[in-house]
Amino acid sequence: MRGDEITSAGEILERLKKSSNLGQQLEQARIWERWPEVAGSLAAHGMPRHIRRNVLTIEVDSPVWMHKFAYHKWGLIARINRMAGHELVHDVFLKLREE
C-alpha cells in the first residue's frame, strides 16, 4: 500500500482481526455465540468457559454429561474449526460444574 492510497475502515479492521489478539478473541467469541449450533443436544448440559493455548475448557453439569462430552469431543473440535475456517481449537478440557 502506498502512502497516498485510501484504506477503508473495513480493510483496517480485517487486518487487525488477522494480526492482533483482539482479532483472535473475537473469533473465539463466536464459539459462545454459536454454542447451541456447535454442541447440538449437549449444549444445555455444558458451557464453554475459556480458551487457553487453543484448548477449550467446557464446564459440564454432571459426570454423566462429562462422559457424553468426552465421547463427542472430536466432533465438537471439528465443528468449531470448520466454523472458524482453520484450527482454532485443538483440544477440549472438561471440568465438572461446581454447585
Image (spheres, rainbow, N blue to C red):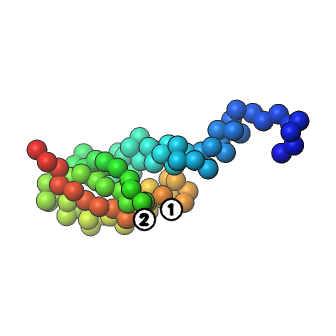
Q: Position of residue 74 (x, y in %)?
A: 37, 66
Which numbered disc covers residue 47? none
Is residue 37 at least partly visible in the picture? no
Distance, label 2 to label 1, CA atoms, is: 7 Å
At horizontal 44% and vertical 43% (from top left) the residue drawn is 29
Q: Is residue 99 left or right of residue 86?
A: left
Q: Quadrant of the C terminus?
A: top left
Residue contact at pointers 2 and 1, CB within 8 angstroms? yes
Q: Residues within 10 Å of mark 2 (few under 14, many from 20)?
A: some
At horizontal 13% and vertical 59% (from top left) the residue drawn is 63
Q: Amino acid at mark 1?
A: Glu
Instruction: Count the labels in the image.
Output: 2
Quarter of the view holding residue 44? top left
Q: Is residue 11 left or right of residue 37?
A: right
Q: Position of residue 93 (x, y in %)?
A: 29, 61
Q: Residues within 10 Å of mark 1 (few under 14, many from 20)?
A: few
Nearest the viewer among 17 and 74 is 17
Q: Residue furthest left?
A: 99
Q: Quadrant of the N terminus?
A: top right
Identify the secondary structure beneath mark 1.
Answer: loop
To which residue does mark 1 refer? 87
Q: Is residue 47 left or right of residue 22?
A: left
At horizontal 33% and vertical 62% (from top left) the residue drawn is 92
Identify the secondary structure beneath mark 2.
Answer: loop
Nearest the viewer among 14 and 32 is 14
Q: Position of residue 9 (x, y in %)?
A: 70, 32
Q: Amino acid at mark 2?
A: His
Quarter of the view holding residue 14? top right
Is residue 10 at least partly visible in the picture? yes
Q: Position of residue 10 (x, y in %)?
A: 68, 35
To which residue does mark 2 refer? 90
